Amino acid sequence: MSVAGDTFPTRPPRRRGERLSGWSLGAGALAALVCLPVLAVLAIAAAPTGGIWQQLWSTVLPGYIGNTLALMLLVGVGVALTGTTTAWLTTMCQFPGRRLFEWALLLPLAFPAYVVAIVYVELLDYAGPLQGGLRALFGWQGPGAYWFPEIRSLGGAAAMLILVLYPYVYLLARTAFLDTSVSALEVARTLGQGPWQAFRTVTLPLARPAIVIGVALALMEVLADFGTVQIFAVETFTTGIYDVWLGFNNVRAAAQLAGLLLLFVLALIWIEWSSRRGRRFHNAGRHYRALPRQPLRGGRAAAAVAACLAPLALGFLLPAAVLLAWAVRTFGDLRLGDYLSDLANTLGLGLATAALAVAVAMYLSYAMRLSHGRVLVAAARLAASGYALPGPVIAVGVLLPFAWFDNMLIEWLRAHFGFTIGMLLSGTVVALTFAYLVRFMALALGSVEASLMRVTPNMDGAARTLGHGRWSILFRVHLPLIRGGALTAALLVLVEVMKELPATLILRPFNFSTLATRVFEFAADEQFEETGLWALSIVAAGVVPVALLSLSIGRSRPGAG
């Protein structure tokens, strides 16, 4: 008698269908709720504008489009070159310090781009220590006496974003390189190709999908960035949404810009998908051996060390050292009450969002486990789509329906009971938490779903024979087994909430600050050194998931220990 999980007795088909319809309806309701911000933005953007579009086009819109496209081009090229080069060197070559660089090159991912921007503005601006030292050394008088690259510019903003976003390409490209078949490389060598030719004709084409995805992820972060471009005075869609809404109090114009920004994101997704359509990127063999690394000596080894050390030093070591120095220097004037309040607000929002995200991810993942129907799968994928949307788009989409609901409730209470209340949703931590949930749902769903897939279906069958229902199996069987994945999901969401800036600036309650908003306020007032402790706290939290990635990436090659 077989004891396979699918041989256990099941409930009658009709009753099973009723249960599944309940899960399907619940998943559909969650997906609709999570997609509400996007639908709200599209609805407002599609409504008659009353001349707003023409006014935007004749004033600021061409500048927003041009700056955004130029920034995407510069950052896309920069992260592709930096990430692919460092990934190839640490995977395919042998040189001093390679094992250190393998994991250390991921560390810039812990830095929010706006924090790195603050550091370099203070260091490289006209009043900074570098230019001041050059003037004192050479006796230059005034800015017209010498040339120095302008840090507050489009190129400066692109450089800051490249320094913190290249790990997206590095992570995915190195994983793809680790998956390279040694047999394919040996065939290339037998055809007379050297290491560089084999990389160009074999390794790089196989890794192309991973590189394209890494660049697309980095460009989505460029579209979502607000702090860096605001500090560097570069007008893009994100700064435009913020200025039009809060500066000119024009919700409809902000929705128009958010809708256009959403088109940019959808275009990126389509480009990435269409680049792989109809193509297959498979390794021919199933047997994996250790990759043969090309030994580098002399000048080549020095060049490899320099190529890996430059992005690490500029993107992590130098900014971290500067922030630590600022924190120590300003510790005597530290406003401890403000710091503790901001830390408590940030952790409270992060923990609440993490708990909600993991709960929703558990429900959706378990629903897909019970039935692989198209409705459930589509609902789960819709719930995870918010991660591709910039924070300003989600902020606009959250506040519009929440404000509508609050206004309707206020009018109803006034008409029927003769009294009014304040806003229940908009302008509160409820709206902010919901925006975080929409933005980072994909992180929780991916981790929880991957963990749940590793639980054998035989356990479900065994639990059913013992009289457990679906909810009992979820809480008493699956949850203890996947608690590691659930904790990882919660950690990832918590860290992203701590770093999120544009949605927090737009949706936060009055006189409510987080670590990220306080750093931005200090930077706006040119009080760069005061950001030290606040920024270090954000970076310290970001190092934790980066360390987890560093521990796992080397084991991604099949057969690795």
Image: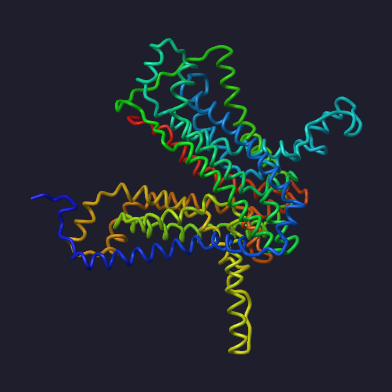
Where residue 512 sits, quadrant-wise, is bottom right
Instruction: Tell me: 335 left or right of 361.
Output: right
The vertical placement of 362 against 14, above or below, is above
Q: Residue furthest top?
A: 192
Q: Residue furthest right?
A: 141
* Residue name at image x 54 percent, y 32 percent: 105
* Residue name at image x 43 percent, y 28 percent: 206
Where residue 291 sits, quadrant-wise, is top left
* Residue closer to the observer: 250 or 243: 250
Way the structure is coloured = rainbow
Quadrant showing the C terminus:
top left
* Residue closer to the observer: 215 or 373: 373
* Residue 557 percent location from the top left of the image: 38, 31
* Residue 149 percent location from the top left of the image: 78, 32
Instruction: Tell me: 561 left or right of 539.
Output: left
* Residue 204 percent location from the top left of the image: 47, 25
* Residue closer to the observer: 134 or 208: 208
Counting labels gives: 0
Q: Residue furthest left?
A: 1
Instruction: Tell me: 24 left or right of 162.
Output: left
Q: Residue furthest bottom?
A: 417
The vertical placement of 225 against 350, above or below, is above
Instruction: Tell me: 38 left or right of 383.
Output: right
* Residue 334 percent location from the top left of the image: 71, 53
* Residue name at image x 35 percent, y 63 percent: 24
* Residue closer to the observer: 257 or 129: 257
